[in-house]
Image (cartoon, helix red, strand yellow):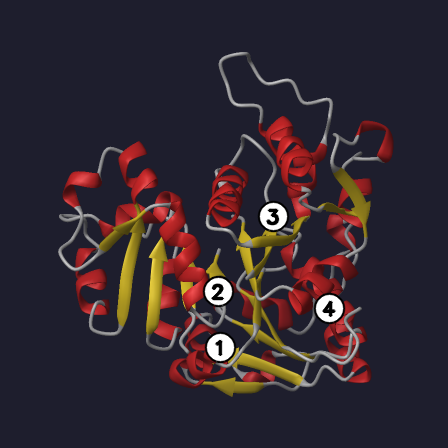
Amino acid sequence: MPILNIVNKSPLERNALASCLRIAAPGALLLIEDAVYAATRGTSTEAEITTALSKFRIYALLPDLQARAVADRVIDGVATIDYEGFVDLVAEHSACQSWL
Amino acid sequence: MSEGITKKFMFVNRTAPYGSIYALESLEVVLITAAFDQDVSVVFIDDGVWQLKKGQQTKGIETKNFSPTYRALEGYDVEKLYVDRESLAARGLTEEDLLVDVVVMDADELGKLMAEQDVILSF
Amino acid sequence: MKFGIQINEGPYQRQASDSAYLFCKAVLAKGHEIHRVFFYHDGVNNASRLTEPPQDDRNIVARWSKLAADHGVDLVVCVAAALRRGIKDENLAPGFRISGLGQLVECGIQADRLVVFGD
């Protein structure tokens, strides 16, 4: 059973997402807090996510997208979930790793 | 209450020492986890590799130099220390610069190791 | 399923405590159990009963206390981190208790999943 990787930093500010994508084994990636900007179209890091979709199932937390006014620009292939979906993801994976 | 259960704990260190408390706290939890007879791995990635740099002198910042503790880990049966090869290279470091023996790993090896863990704590 | 939660950041400065709280509510709503919430590093500041946010803001500390009162959630504050930051029994909010790092490790062992919220 693969693990769930959680990232909470904007990829334009810190390297947490880049390190996660480089190191983590194929599995799932959940973007929360400031990391939801990584899930949006048109940023300079968009290609990192579109490329990573072949290795990870990628999710973004909808309440965090909505709070930041970017829920309407989520990259195709990235699924949006609420907190209950977050709980389901944790339960469905063998462990989770927060790339703080 | 926890007797008889052995889980795989991995400590992922991605922060430099002294600039924040995480490196020091990570060592604390590693030692306590070892005292609970758990299977402990410690991984150094990104600026976390600076924690292992030889020659730390902290007198001038009036902070305790905790780097000797990494060499003492073996005495607590914490022997699985892994360093990300790319993070070392990106900082101009080689194994010669590190104050303790480690296993240097490629990203995909580290990723596989992470995927085998039961509990992953990030610092 | 039993969940363990670790919180590394204090209230108000970062989103970590808010995210962790909403996650805990969802864990309970889905019928799971929370084995423990462990407050570590600056996260111990979530336990100060002297906290007084403006009236139009959420009360993060009171929210945790209510979660403990309503659902019996075990809120544990790391003793070493707490004493460093002036969090003691006399200013501890209801529902929190101060204990050692062993409680975090025990939580990692006993819970089915451990989720870390921090910065």
The N terminus of chain C: image quadrant: bottom right
Residue denoted by label 3: C8
Instruction: Name the kind of residue labelled 2 in the image.
Output: Gln
Q: Are marks 1 and 2 on the same chain?
A: no
Residue denoted by label 1: B114
Labelled disc at residue A3: none
- CA gap between label 3 and label 4 equals 23 Å
Q: Is residue A40 visible?
A: yes
Pinpoint the chain carrying mark 2.
Answer: A
In the rendered view, tell whether residue C57 sits above or below residue A72. Answer: above
Helix, strand or loop status at disc 1: helix
- Identify the image quadrant of residue A54: bottom left
In the rendered view, tell whether residue B26 sits above or below residue B93. Answer: above
Instruction: Name the kind of residue labelled 4 in the image.
Output: Ser
Residue denoted by label 4: B67
Q: Nearer the viewer, residue B57 or B49?
A: B49
Instruction: Name the kind of residue labelled 3 in the image.
Output: Asn
**Please, which residue is most extreme toward the front here?**
C31
